[in-house]
Amino acid sequence: MSETAENLLPALSLPEHNQLWLALSGGLDSVVLLDLAVNWCRVNDQVLRVIHIHHGLSPNADQWARFCQVLCLDYTRNNDVSVEFECHRVTLDLAGNIEEQARKARYAVFEQQLGKNDLLLMAHHSDDQAETFLLRLLRGSGSQGLRGMPVLRSLGQGKLFRPLLSVQRKQLEQWAEKYRLNWVDDESNQSLAFDRNYLRHKVIPAIQARWPESHQQFMKATANLADEAGLLRDLAELDLQSVRQSSAWSREVLCCDALRRLSEQRRINVLRHWLADQGMSALEKKQWQIVLDEILAARQDAEPCFRWQGKALRRFRNQLFCISEADSEYVVTAESEKDSRVHLAVYSEKGGAVELNLPGLLSVTLMPGRADNSDESVIALPDTGYLEVRPRQGGEVIRLKGRGKKQVKKLLQESQIPPWIRQKLPMLWWCSADGEEQLIAVADRWLSESHLAAQSGRCWQLTVSYLSV
């Protein structure tokens, strides 16, 4: 075995995992990694699953997908190992930032495919790391961005692992030459219209010509910055303990008053890490100013909302929520209305739990229960007519025990329920065969006096899941 091989093989020491995956573009880097991974799987008696992303951007994209498929078949035939191939096509908006869209589309597929504790191998090497460092430096990134790509990080239910980050591309070329590997060349890698390509072909060669040790210095800088980023993460975790609060409406919220007591630098640091954990993309300076000035500094009775790349940062009653932007929208689709109704005669006969759904609203679950004066979410229902979940239309009135008739609008205004939850509260109606209709419940918050369960007799437990929002 050559010196090159001895330098590469130790890099493929893999963390514990369930299923092993590999991202294969068909280029030199990923083909070398595939060769290494097949050897590892043969020794460790594992199945290797390979993902190829078909971006549809090149006239050669179909040929690349076929090349990758045949390559995996050849490895399976010629080695005592199973290499399973799958190709995923993605659609991109040609009018936008193609590089960023392609990256997001790839990672979205990877995240969907990985199961619990699965491991995805990617072939990024130290030359890629240097390019990433320079790109982010030119964009004004701080230590969090300049630390570069991590060797190991979470991705969906599994993890992403880059075993070649300490290896230079020239070493991969030597490996491919020694073992006579074939690969495809993406013509777009030569286009100087892309920032990364410009750095690769113009800037980095000039830097290396003037400073031959620059590659090692880039790696040293990213390692030092990774250490600093780790310290900032530790500080954020400490600060989160003082600003994090529990909520019935979200798995985790932050206290705005507690955030304001931190210095601006620590405030931004804890928010940056918390928002990243909630899945929000990194903010730029302009967006941070909006968050600090218009969200955190807003009046106590204000309900500001900041939207950014699919996520929404909302404030309500001194608490900060990070939710999916889709959860801020109210959409009901007519084709799903069949799931929003249940005929009581059929339900009473079959028994068991039943779930009423109308997309855009929280789901309602009914299951047989027993009357209990301490449980206000137990209702009595007749064996005739049907139950139906509807969105709030306005003007609804419900009669509450000991309080008489109340407008639903008034109840919602007086409640401590965030506005984006209010619009998703399901209205549960009982409808008779002759057209009579009664509002019997507003989610599980307010139940009609006429349908409260008696001390005895058949009744149903009504539950609504709020943490799904």
Image (tube, helix red, strand yellow):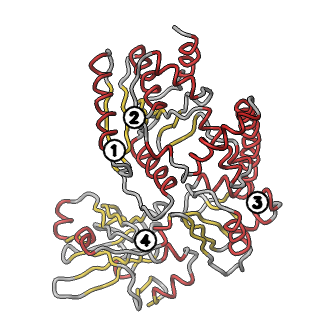
Q: Amino acid at mark 4?
A: Asp
268 sits to left or right of 197: right
Which residue occupies the foreground of this view, 192 or 305? 192
Q: Amino acid at mark 2?
A: Val
In the rendered image, residue 420, in percent from the top left (x then y), is placed at 51, 74
In the figure, residue 303 lies in which quadrant? bottom right
Q: Relative to 444, does residue 22 appear above or below in the rendering?
A: above
From the image, tell me which residue sits under label 3.
267
Q: Amino acid at mark 1?
A: Asn
Does the residue at mark 2 contact the one at mark 1 (Cβ under 8 Å)?
yes
From the image, tell me which residue sits under label 2.
184
Q: Secondary structure at mark 4?
A: loop
Q: Residues within 10 Å of mark 3 (few under 14, many from 20)?
A: some
In the rendered image, residue 352, in percent from the top left (x then y), is placed at 26, 57
Q: If you read the primary sequence from the N terminus, does the residue marked by circle 4 or circle 3 appear first? A: 3
In the rendered image, residue 342, in percent from the top left (x then y), is placed at 23, 70
Q: Nearer the viewer, mark 3 or mark 2?
A: 2
Q: Amino acid at mark 3?
A: Arg
Q: Nearer the viewer, mark 1 or mark 4?
A: 1
In the rendered image, residue 11, in percent from the top left (x then y), is placed at 57, 22
Does the residue at mark 4 contact the one at mark 3 (Cβ under 8 Å)?
no
From the image, tell me which residue sits under label 1.
60
Which residue occupies the foreground of this view, 92 or 227? 92
Q: If you read the primary sequence from the N terminus, does the residue marked by circle 3 or circle 2 appear first? A: 2
What whole-number distance in Å separates the C-alpha atoms at marks 2 and 4? 59 Å
Which residue occupies the foreground of this view, 76 or 263? 76
Q: If you read the primary sequence from the N terminus, does the residue marked by circle 2 or circle 4 appear first? A: 2
For the point 75% across and 40% down, the residue is 225
From the image, tell me which residue sits under label 4.
444
44 sits to left or right of 244: left
